[in-house]
Amino acid sequence: MTNQSTARPARPGGTSGGAAKTLSSPRIAEMLRVDHAGEYAAVAIYSAQAKVFGRSHQTRKIAAQLQHMCEEEQEHLDAFDALLLEHKAKPTVLLPIWNIASTGLGVATALMGEKAAHACTEAVESVIEQHYAEQIEETKNSDKELCARFTQFREDELRHRDLAIESGAKEAPAYPVLSAVIKAGCRMAIRLSEKI
Ligand SMILES: [Fe+2]
Ligand SMILES: [Fe+2]
């Protein structure tokens, strides 16, 4: 009797002319939910890192860089907030956990130093841009509007990743392990956020 979280169009055969959309509503809700979770986590990570680096004069430059990325992630997050509403889809129930985990990751990597913070960015953005690339492939013939959004956001993530690499991400202490652990965590978060 109560509404299900899976978004359905008001009524098939209604007045909207959405004939081009062949992806199911539950699949779109799943995509939006996981993207929303990813952007939410990105805001939490960069915000935490910016705060840690912002405490010292010597790390003001990286703090400003992270703050700028955080603002771009907030724009992405706002877009997914609106899309979730539009598609009557719910965010993942795991948001409170992602908030704690992402803030913890941001604080920990910032305390490890600038290179580790950049390594975190490189790992997170690599996983997110690959995820967007898969969604672009999935929507390119069925939902051009969503595909355009994913493409635009992927370009921002690629820019974030490249800036982190240019800034020395791969020179971080224990870079291969740090990067592999963060990437594995991101992939697990993606799988969970798609489903619940
Ligand atoms: Fe983003
Ligand atoms: Fe990003």
Image (cartoon, rainbow, N blue to C red):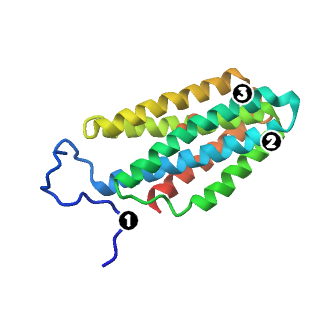
Circle 2 residues within 10 Å: few <14, some 14–19, many ≥20: some
Query: Is the residue 15 above or below the residue 136 in the image?
Result: below
Q: CA distance from mark 3 to mark 2?
A: 21 Å
Q: Which residue is mark 1?
A: 5
Which quadrant of the view contains residue 172? top right
Looking at the picture, how far across and down is residue 42, in whole percent?
A: 61, 43
Q: CA distance from mark 3 to mark 1?
A: 41 Å
Q: Is residue 130 left or right of residue 89?
A: right
Q: Earlier in the sequence, mark 2 or mark 1?
A: 1
Ligand 1 image-quadrant field: top right
Is residue 181 something that shows in the picture?
no
Q: Which residue is mark 2?
A: 52
Of residues 195 and 6, the one nearer the viewer is 6
Q: Tag 2, which secondary structure?
A: helix
Q: Give the amino acid at mark 1.
A: Ser
Q: Tag 3, which secondary structure?
A: helix
